[in-house]
Amino acid sequence: MAELGLNPLLPSHLPTSGQPWYAVRIRSGAEVRVEGALKGRGFHPFLPTYITSRVYSDRIKKVKSALFPGYLFCGFTLEQRVQLLQCEGVESIVCFGNVPARIPDCEIDAIIRVVESGQSSEPWPYLQTGDQVTVQVGSLKGVSGYLLQTKGSDRLLLSISLLQRSISVEIDRSWVRPVVQNVI
């Protein structure tokens, strides 16, 4: 298979390594429908999903949800983008400077491997060292600071500006969420 240019880690319905991957912005909540429509037009979409519990007034139901709500990935050539954009539910292709932004194969391969492994996964806020975060659980719930990484552990940096002094406390990254900045 490798000599034919096929990636042995990819399910057969997904594009080969010869076709670049792009992120496609779609109408939120319509991920499965848009995926089917794209397949019907000959595209090779990849919609990573996970199982979550939804609570209704009379029951709890396990449902399949998009790992990246409002997005799916698709392998296509730039000549096909107009046809892709004409598909109902497709809003745009993620671009930088009006040029579709290709997603590195290694990043898509990693997501495919996680989904195909059957391991439990879920959407998570994109956090980087230096991001302002708020603790969501435990005795520090509600405390805000900056995310640091020191000696392989995550830490929350807290400062007293007046004194120009800071402290850091070890935390578990799963305890924090990014602080949403209000844009005026």
Image (cartoon, helix red, strand yellow):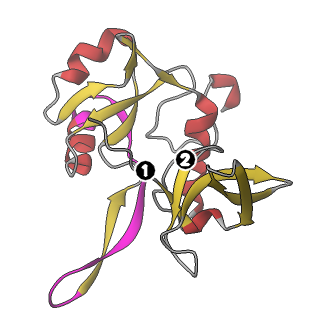
CB-based contact (under 8 Å), mark 1 and mark 2: yes
**Residue 143 left/right relative to 93:** right
- Residue 103's label in the rendered image is none
Residue 72, x across and y down, in percent: 36, 40
- Residue 112's label in the rendered image is 2
Q: Quadrant of residue 80?
A: top left
Q: Secondary structure at mark 1?
A: loop
Q: Which residues are magenta?
A: 38-59
The front one of 172 and 162 is: 162
Q: Quadrant of residue 81?
A: top left
Q: Secondary structure at mark 2?
A: helix
Would you place residue 18 above or below residue 152 in this image?
above
Question: At label 2, which amino acid type do we have?
Answer: Ile
Instruction: State which quarter of the image contains the C terminus.
Output: top left
Residue 52, x across and y down, in percent: 37, 71
- Residue 48's label in the rendered image is 1
Looking at this view, name the residue that lies furthest to the front.
Answer: 162
Q: Crowding near pointer 1: few (<14 within 10 Å), some, many (20+)?
A: many
Look at the image and say whether residue 46 sits in the magenta stretch. yes
* Residue at position x 29%, y 28% in the image: 42
